[in-house]
Structures are given as C-alpha cells and as structure tokens.
Image (cartoon, rainbow, N blue to C red):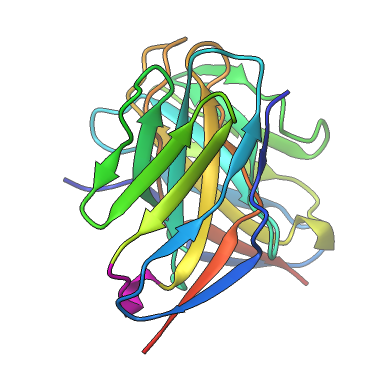
Amino acid sequence: NAGVMQNPRHLVRRRGQEARLRCSPMKGHSHVYWYRQLPEEGLKFMVYLQKENIIDESGMPKERFSAEFPKEGPSILRIQQVVRGDSAAYFCASSRARQGVADTQYFGPGTRLTVL
Amino acid sequence: AQTVTQSQPEMSVQEAETVTLSCTYDTSENNYYLFWYKQPPSRQMILVIRQEAYKQQNATENRFSVNFQKAAKSFSLKISDSQLGDTAMYFCAFMKETGAQKLVFGQGTRLTINP
C-alpha cells in the first residue's frame, strides 16, 4: 500500500526559472494539501485541492504560485520565476475526507527546493 | 484564527526515560482534532497520535500517550521508555472538524534521546 509520493525529492533552480513539484496521493485518497516548511520552522498550509477543484488556497501567495489536481495524474504545485525566498521544503499530504468533514492527513517525503 | 504554541524549542533525555512535550492552542471551536507529528532527520512527516476533542479519553499508541485538557486548551505528548529512534522534531497540530481542513502547526520541539 504505497504512501503519498512526491517527486522530485530535491530540486535546484536558478532565480527566474520555474519549479514544478508533483504529488500522488495515497490510494483511495482524493484530497490533497500542500504545505511549506521554511528552515527551522513548522509547516504552513498553502492550498487544499480535490480532483479538478481548488477548495482553499488561502495560504498560497497570490503571485507566481499555482496548484492543480487534474482528473488524471498527480497534483502539481508550480512556482514561476523563483526567488531565493522560495527555498524551502514543500510537503504534500492526502486524506480521504469527504468535503467539509475532517480526516487524518498523511504526508509525503517532501521536495526540497533550493534556489540559487 | 487558530494558533498552536510549543514552548519548548529543545529537549534532551537519556534513553529509557520518560519525556513530556508541551502544546497549547487557541480556538473558539468546540469540535476539532489534535495531532502530534514526528519529523526525524529524514524529514518525513510521520503521524504519531491523534485526538478527537469530543473524546474525554486520552489517546494512546504503544509508548506514546497524550494528556488532553480541553478546558485548558492543552495537549501534551508523553513518550515512555524513550528510544534512540525517537530523536526527531515533534510538531503539534490542530484541525477544525468541519470547514477548512488545513492543519495549523506549532513551531516544533527538537527532541534528542541520548544513549
């Protein structure tokens, strides 16, 4: 029973490039969440998605960041024109919650983004 | 908005000892969930234990147990018979029962188990 999968595990980008982070939820889970962890800090919520639908993006910066969870394939977190301040670990979590009813979130191993 | 506070940035104990990590939170919600997650050096986030606010009984998972005090908004984690593999960052997290399903995390406690 595969857990939440994220790739790549490590990503290096130069300032101004684009970063694409992928997340495949656990089998049977249809809800995906993205969190960001800056060095020596806790995780901060960014966005919550279901298939083809963004439910809550209140934690995501308004510019340069976007997320999607298509009908087929993994969820993608996209960061355009990266800056050094985007360097962080990005974690994806999934749950099988019905919308509006909470359930435990299980995390992937994270993608460590380094912006040079 | 909900907030979660972990007042102990670092803790260190000897192997086989018992250690308690503190967590307090602030919310106006009556129904919610509380979690402890562990982040070892591999940086994987691992669920340790979960508590539903409507349950009076404290959750237990093997050597891990919680002391949930709803009125005091306190949710501490006790690790018994600590092992070297328990060395990790520990994060307390809050989630509302309905509506926004985002986890709100504390700042974390770095726990070191010494041989």
Q: Is residue A35 left or right of residue A108?
A: right
Q: Is residue A107 above or below residue A104?
A: below
Q: Nearer the viewer, residue B35 or B62?
A: B62
Q: Position of residue A56 (x, y in %)?
A: 62, 20
- Image quarter hosting the N terminus of chain B: top right
Task: Identify the residue at image location x=40%, y=35%.
Answer: A105
As displayed, is residue A105 above or below residue B6? above
Q: Name the residue located 70 percent from the left edge and 58 percent from the top edge.
A: A38
**Rendered residue at 30%/75% (across/down):** B83
- Residue B82 among those drawn in magenta: yes
Instruction: Residue lying at the far left in this picture: please name it.
Output: A1
Question: In the picture provided, is A104 more to the left or to the right than B13?
Answer: left
Residue A42 sits above or below residue B85 on the image? above
Residue A21 colored magenta? Answer: no
Q: Name which residue lies at 24% across and 28% down.
A: A28
Q: Position of residue A23 (x, y in %)?
A: 44, 44
Let me know if residue B95 appears in the view: yes
Q: Which image quadrant is residue B50 in?
A: top left
- Mark yes or no: residue A7 visible: no
Quarter containing the C terminus of chain B: bottom left
Q: Nearer the viewer, residue B20 or A46?
A: B20
Residue A45: x and y, percent?
A: 63, 37
Give the answer, above or below, for where B88 lies relative to A106: below
- Magenta part of the protein: which range? B81-86
Q: Nearer the viewer, residue B112 or B45?
A: B112
Residue A3 drawn at (x, y percent) = 28, 47
Which quadrant would residue B15 be assigned to in this image? bottom left
